[in-house]
Amino acid sequence: MVRTVAVLGAGPSGLTSIKSCLDEGLEPTCFESGPDIGGLWRFKNKPEPGRANIYQSVVINTSKEMMAFSDFPPPAHFPNNMHHSEVLLYLRQYAQTFGLLQHIHLQTTVVGVRQTPDFASSGRWEVETERHDGQRESHVFDAVMVCTGHYATPNLPLKDFPGIDSFEGKYFHSWEYRSPEGLEGKRVVVVGMGNSGGDIAVDISRVAEKVYLSTRSGAWVLGRVGPGGLPQDLFGTSRLDLLKLKLFPSWVNRMTEKKINQFFDHQLYGIRPTHDFLSQVPVVNDDLPARIITGRVQVKPNLKRFEGSDAIFDDGTVVKKVDVVVFATGYNYGFPFLPSDLQFKCGPGPQHRVYRHVFALGLAPPTLALIGLIDGNGPVNRLAELQARWATRIFKGLISLPSQEVMAKYIEKEMATVCKRFTNAEKNPLQVDIPTYIDSLVKDVGVQPNLLRLFLTDPKLAWQVLLGPSTPYQFRLCGPGNWEGARGAILNLWERVHQPFRSRRPEPAPQTKRPQGLIVLLSGAAILMFYFYKNHHLRLSFFSFNNVRS
């Protein structure tokens, strides 16, 4: 029987794992190598090897309501897209509210995790730690939750850029970037057009002579600001929207691309990707189009090689006298403290064999869980929280995993589906389709909202669950860990969204036009009827009509 749990890391995934342990009556002990909680969101003035780092200007891509933990809505006065300092404050409030800090040992690094000699029968782990003063200790735990993230080891593929060894300027990975200080008047090339590459190009362009943004395949770019000036990710993410996506993916993709190009033509701006919008996580950047139209950022194709201080691109164009190159080329990840067989199964590459991205295949009893080791178009907080809730119930024996054979087939099927859906997914085993992934977890945990029952007992809430944003609070309405405040958190969402805008003078909250009109209702009914016709039942993704009790 699992009682004691080691939690490795005190970032968002570690904090929600501690809380999930406490909710299930387990005894967590968290080891954090840094001097404070927060993980990625703890800004460091100087890069700290082995830890994730962020730059001064970082603002979250997702709105506060979509990245919130399911039973802890952010304060109403917090901005909708928070600066990293406000994210850290939110995490600190979460830890203080639920009494998590007393379970955390700061400046304590985990240097080894190994199975005890009787592991086959006990499932226990020996965890070796080292304090900042060099003192080492050994502890035995019934289970382990690994929450160390995957943004700590920069991927710097210098071999792909001939001439870099003799490059006369300076180069570094985006992991080292803090601010544009020292880049005034410089000619800068940023390699890579992910979220970090776009952010850094914009940031540097405010002081540099010129910034050149090199991209191999382009990207779809979205802003944080959506209809009516409200957060973009609160629109198009309802359960009805997700059902439309499931039924008519090609049509949804075309309409989305058309809408994005109405804001700015990606072809004209030189960044239209070769892949569909739904085939890769988009770049979220409000400022990039403005920096391109003003000439402060110039988009270039793939960087081919260097000659002295010159950068030569695939189209034959040359940027002379480059001062600095920033490689925003992603990250590697690994678990050097784990046994070698688990390092292999849990690491990057085709050998990655982790059931639902939490439990390594072949590990029995399943007493080691990976939390937050996942990629997708959305915030990791809600995914990590569901993973932690699921894992702790497996630790307690309340949920059983399938057989090894069934899990192996599941992993193969999921990888095939993801590779078919997403571009270059075979190179990223952490990639998931978030709605499908969440659906699988909430069913197992038993927290899937029963929409038909809600319509019969609480129609106002039911309409909001169906047509409003799919917020994490919906997974506290019922089942294990249900929270009496979930209903209010859902119904009062727009009040919290509007509150930060009321900084000039007190005014009544504007009436948000929500998609609850007759046309939308009729469209929804038509979609439901079509789905019923195709499937002969109403087992809808994200909610169920077939679990109604009499």
Image: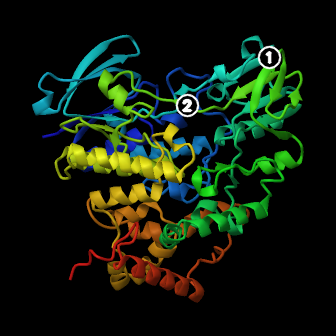
248 vs 493, nearest the viewer: 248
Q: Are marks 2 and 1 in contact (CB under 8 Å)?
A: no
Quarter placement of the N terminus: top left
Residue 228 in picture, x, y percent from top left:
70, 69
Asked if one can make out residue 191 in the rendered structure from this viewpoint, the answer is yes
In-image side of 211 versus 366 (left or right): right
Instruction: Identify the residue at image location x=35%, y=57%.
Output: 440
Q: Is residue 204 above or below residue 383?
A: above
Residue labelled with disc 1 = 169
Q: Amino acid at mark 1?
A: Gly
Can you tell which mark lies on residue 331?
2
372 vs 158, nearest the viewer: 158
Crowding around mark 1 (Cα neighbors within 10 Å: few <14, some 14 to 19, many 20+) is some
Secondary element under disc 2, as helix, strand or loop, is strand
Secondary element under disc 1, as helix, strand or loop, is loop
Instruction: Find the distance from the CA under tag 2 to the CA under tag 1.
Output: 23 Å
Residue 318 in picture, x, y percent from top left:
87, 28
Residue 398 in picture, x, y percent from top left:
18, 52
How many numbered marks have been drawn onto this rendered protein structure? 2
- Does label 2 or label 1 sit earlier along the sequence? 1
Q: Is residue 435 above or below residue 319?
A: below
Asked if one can make out residue 20 in the rendered structure from this viewpoint, the answer is no
Instruction: Identify the residue at image location x=67%, y=35%.
Output: 56
Residue 32 in picture, x, y percent from top left:
40, 28
Q: Is residue 29 above or below residue 459?
A: above
